[in-house]
Amino acid sequence: MVKLLSTKELRNMPVADLRRDMRNLQGELAKQRMGLQLGKEKNSGTYRAEKRQMARMLTVLGEKAGESLQSTKANSTVAAPAEAKPTKAPAKKRSVSTKKAS
């Protein structure tokens, strides 16, 4: 069983450690899921807690990815596009005939 960490503790972890722990947790979740489906595992509370832990880890990884993306955007010297692409004209509406096909 993986030690459940708070979001604050997860945010302080390096990305490599988060990814390693996520792989371990995915394996454990798969085992527990099978155990629950086969009736071998009786405690579904630990499964739910570990699923929430996985969601926390994914959230923190997403936050860290966003932070690194923002920092690279701030440091980049690429100019933004001058104007947006022109939009297409709306499609023409066709009239619906009320004649029945023979």
Image (spheres, helix red, strand yellow):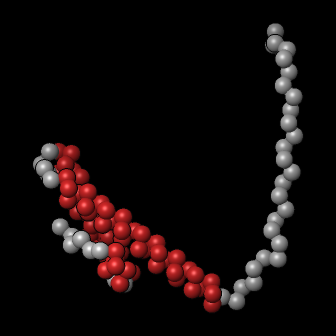
Residue 79 shown left or right of residue 72 in the figure: right
Q: In which quarter of the image is residue 72?
A: bottom right
Residue 11 shown left or right of residue 82 in the figure: left
Q: Is residue 102 depicted above or below 16 in this figure?
A: above
Where does the image place residue 25, in percent across and percent down from the top left?
Answer: 27, 67
Q: Does residue 35 appear anywhere in the picture?
A: yes
Q: In the displayed orientation, state which residue is furthest to the top.
A: 102
Residue 18 shown left or right of residue 2 in the figure: right
Which residue is found at the position 17% from the left and 45% from the top? 38
Q: How many marks?
A: 0
Which residue is found at the position 15% from the left and 53% from the top? 43
Where does the image place residue 1, in percent across and percent down from the top left?
Answer: 17, 67
Which residue is found at the position 84% from the left and 47% from the top? 90
Q: Is residue 68 depicted above or below 3 in this figure?
A: below
Q: The C terminus appears in which quarter of the rendering?
A: top right
Q: Is residue 51 depicted above or below 12 in this figure?
A: above
Where does the image place residue 74, in percent across and percent down from the top left?
Answer: 63, 87
Q: Quadrant of residue 19?
A: bottom left
Q: Is residue 14 depicted above or below 88 in this figure?
A: below
Which residue is found at the position 82% from the left and 65% from the top? 85
Where does the image place residue 48, in percent across and percent down from the top left?
Answer: 26, 57
Q: In which quarter of the image is residue 52?
A: bottom left
Q: Does residue 31 appear anywhere in the picture?
A: no
